[in-house]
Every structure is written in structure tokens, then in C-alpha cells.
Amino acid sequence: MIILKTSDEIECIAQASRIVAECQKVLIGLIKPGMSTLALDKVTEECIRDLGGIPAFKGYRNYPNSLCASVNEEVVHGIPSHRVLKEGDIVGLDIGAIVQGFYGDGAVTVAIGEVDSQKVLLIDVTREALQKGLEQAIVGNRLSDISHAIQEHVERHGFSVVRDFVGHGIGRQLHEEPQVPNYGKAGQGPRLKAGMALAIEPMVNMGKPGVKVLEDGWTAVTTDGSWSAHFEHTITVESSGPPRILTACA
Ligand code: MF3
Ligand code: CO
């Protein structure tokens, strides 16, 4: 069942999402070669708590940290570690916060210093694909219109969309119905209604779409070793016009 949110509930999701966006801004401002992903995790947790939120990922199915930091061929759910970022790396920063029992969830992928142009393109295409998906998140459309728009943009650039992880409804739970795949035919699935809150999150590989989870039980990497990018926004479907993007940087 897809749970429609009241405007009060949406304000809680919005507050949680604003915290996510603020933390992203802080991380982007200080990330540089030589920093470990664990240092970024520490900043993330402090930032979420300073802003009045609770880190959403820490303890979620025993996930150990507040940040998912996925470097290069890591797709999502990279566990922060003493690994040091170096010039030329790319890193996905995925953050969740809880405010008054409601979740916000968002991710960006950033380049560390100078990064080769194909990888910059990978990041740009993934960000654009999210944007294309958001443009379809309008009342009366069907869910897979979002999925299809994302896939089409990605494949037009010769990259591939990850199948094994999908976006999701969001609210009192991090993952609610519906699942929001980043691939599929248009015109399928439930109609979008005002009050739906969705986390839309394309994961895009330079090579093949396959992924596998490492022995830590979390870190998903590409099976072919190609690099991967991830962007995510928490949004609400509005009664008319474009969605409200709750994790947009102020
Ligand atoms: N944005 C990711 C998701 O929706 C992050 C979850 S990390 C977890 O799945 F640790 F909380 F699972
Ligand atoms: Co998510």
C-alpha cells in the first residue's frame, strides 16, 4: 500500500530532508584528497545531530554508520573506513535523517580534485537522469514514467542503469511502497497522486549493470569493476506542477 502523506507529515519529511541537504553542503565544502571516508562520516553524524535530526542509517538493519560513502567502482552502501580519498576518485555520499519519526534520504556523487572526463560525464549524466525522472513525477503520470525517463537518459549516453537497487516510497519508514526502479517501459504501475513521498535514486554504471555485495554484507560494487555514480532526492508529488524537491540544497 502506498501511504499518502498529510501536509503536517510532509513538513516533517521536509525538515529531515533539509538536514540531509545541509549535511551534503557541509561535506562538499570540506571534502578533499587525503580525507578518509570515516572522517566524513563523523562530520555527517555531528551535522545531522546539530541540526536536530537523528542519523537514519546508523543501526538500520545493523548498518554501522551515518553516511554511505561509495568510492569509484562502489555503487551504493559503502561503509566508511580509513580509506583515504585521492585526487581522481569519485565518491557517492548518501545520507538519511529522521525528524519527528519521519525520514529524509538523499545522495550526491562528487569528484575529488581533477577527475578524467568520462567520469565527470558519468556524474553529470546520473544527475541529469535524476532530473529527467523528477520531471515525470507529476500527478496523473504513472510510476514507470519516472523509471523510463531515467533509463532512457542513461542509455542514450552509453552507460547502464543498476537493476538490483531501486528508489522507494519514504515516510515513517525509510523504505515504503512503491519501489521506484530506474528502468522500465513507460505507462505502467500506479498513478502518481498528490501526497506521495518518493526517494528517487538512479545508480549508473559506466560498464555493465551488474552489481555484487562484498563480504561486509553492505558494500555493493560493479561486477565488471567499472565506476558508478548515484544521485538521490526525496520529493513529494504535488496537486499540480512539478514535484517539491525536499533534499535540494537551499
Ligand atoms: N539511500 C539508501 C537506500 O535508500 C541508503 C540506505 S543505507 C542503509 O537504501 F544503511 F540505511 F541501509
Ligand atoms: Co534511498
Image (cartoon, grey):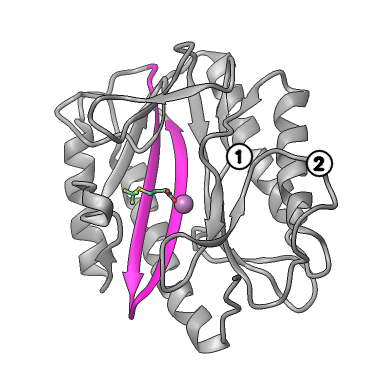
Q: Position of residue 145 (x, y in %)?
A: 79, 51
Above or below — where is 41 with respect to 207? below
Q: Secondary structure at mark 2?
A: loop
Above or below — where is 231 with respect to 121? below
User: Does the magenta segment cover residue 232?
Assistant: no
Q: Is mark 2 within 8 Å of ligand 2?
A: no
Above or below — where is 38 with respect to 5? above
Closer to viewer: mark 2 or mark 1: 2
Could you tell me the amino acid type at mark 1?
Answer: Arg
Which label belongs to residue 185?
Answer: 2
Q: Quadrant of the N terminus?
A: bottom right
Per the rendered image, the range of residues in magenta is 88-110
User: How far is mark 2 from mark 1, CA to CA?
Assistant: 21 Å
Q: Position of residue 195 (x, y in %)?
A: 64, 77
Residue, x 60% and y 71% (percent of image)? 2
Residue, x 52% and y 79% (percent of image)? 10
Most foreground residue, 141 or 233? 141
Q: Position of residue 82 (x, y in %)?
A: 14, 28
Could you tell me the amino acid type at mark 2?
Answer: Lys
Instruction: Write down the quadrant of residue 93 in the picture.
Output: top left
Residue, x 58% and y 14% (percent of image)? 207
Most foreground residue, 64 or 189? 189
Q: Position of residue 34 (x, y in %)?
A: 20, 24
Prevailing secondary structure of the magenta residues = strand
Most foreground residue, 162 or 125? 162
Q: Secondary structure at mark 1?
A: helix
Q: Earlier in the sequence, mark 2 or mark 1?
A: 1
Which label belongs to residue 127?
Answer: 1
Mark 1 closeness class: few <14, some 14–19, many ≥20 residues within 10 Å: many
